[in-house]
Amino acid sequence: MIQPNKHVSAVLLVLLLVLVGPSTYVQSRTVSYGPSTFQPVQNETFVDTNISSIQVPANHTIIDGHITVEPVWEAIEENGTYFGTTLPNAWANGTHNQTSSLAHGGQLSLATDSSVGSLTDFEITKMVPTGWLTMGQDGEEWGVQNLSSLPTGPSPRDGNHALAYLTNVQNASGCILSSHYQTPEFISNMSLSFDHWRSIASDDAAWVEYTLNNQSSWQQLVPVGGYSDTVTATHHATAQSFSSVWSGSDEQWTTSRFELDQLTNIANSESMRFRLCIATSTSSNARQGWFIDNVTWHNQGDQPGSWFHGNLSGDYAPNADGTLVMPIDFSGLNNPIELEIRSN
């Protein structure tokens, strides 16, 4: 009984070795191809390209793979026009639509602030403030001056610098134009103000003008309380069209304010600009000049509020009835339209 059992075991062992055979070792590896670049046509919305550079070695099989697609940005030719805070054009050559560059250091904001303002204190090292331009026969006499270094003239108002027209020349005239100010959509208590100090002859003239939408025509701007002097025949020819101007000396810093709400066509304008003008007469009187500081343009704008129905001084009245009408134009809108009202 024992011998047959041993014979069967030997046969089974030989058969097992034959069925298993020699062991094999398969080595996998990762191969990268590319990159392959193609140029899409204009307005193309899909990618259709053939990649024929992939080669599979003999006796190898692709068991996995992936493809990565990314754009390669190419620089386009410039058109020669740039806009920006520090560039000469700034934003002046465009049209503002619900935007503003006044209250954010010259940066363009996506919404016009209900209350905006701009202050120019001339504390810079440039001879002419950025965005300002001189004009007129002797406009080059306008410039930013360091008051601490002048032998005569006013003490500094704030800081050390001020805008000044320095000349002792007879029969001279010149203006300096401010930068552009965007007209707010809602005008309320809009004003221009500045501090000034002057030492000019009694028949010299100084005044302020404005224009809307950068038009070539200018109108005199009268301060609150009016100008100090009536124009006479001895004043410079450029001042003869006005009834009053600043003349003579006022050797102390004073603040003049100009109200802008009621200017003709101000509500329909997109921008405004101001210019400070001075004209000396033929008299030989000594002059120290006209000094300007802290030019401020400000609009109070629309103030937040609420609609109220009730009694502020006592209990709510019984049997009260009230209606709030809010005109809303739904033309051009698609359904569904949702109107949300919050009340307290």
Image (cartoon, grey):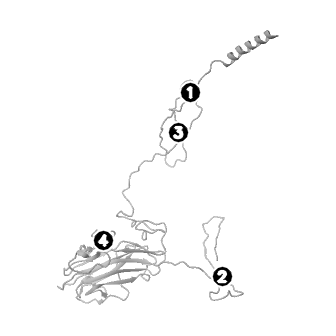
Q: Nearer the viewer, residue 309 or 96?
A: 309
Q: Nearer the viewer, mark 2 or mark 3?
A: 2
Question: From what the image shows, is residue 116 above or below residue 37?
Answer: below
Q: Nearer the viewer, mark 1 or mark 2?
A: 1
Give the residue number, with chain letter if any, for mark 2.
323
Give the residue number, with chain letter if any, for mark 3.
49
- Amino acid at the residue labelled 2: Thr
The crowd level at tag 3 (other Cα within 10 Å; few <14, some 14-19, many 20+) is few
Residues at marks 4 and 3, CA–CA distance in whole angstroms: 57 Å
Q: For mark 1, give the secondary structure.
A: loop
Q: Identify the residue at the far right of this view.
A: 1
Residues at marks 1 and 3, CA–CA distance in whole angstroms: 32 Å
Disc with the residue nearer the chain's start (1 vs 2): 1
Is 123 on the left-hand or right-hand side of 264?
Answer: left
Question: Residue 71, percent across and down?
Answer: 48, 46
- Amino acid at the residue labelled 4: Leu
Question: Residue 146, percent across and down?
Answer: 26, 74
Q: Are marks 4 and 3 in contact (CB under 8 Å)?
A: no
Residue 27, which numbered label? 1
- Amino acid at the residue labelled 3: Thr
Residue 37, which numbered label? none
Q: Quadrant of residue 316?
A: bottom right
Q: Residue at x 66, y 65 (%)?
A: 336
Q: For mark 3, give the secondary structure.
A: loop
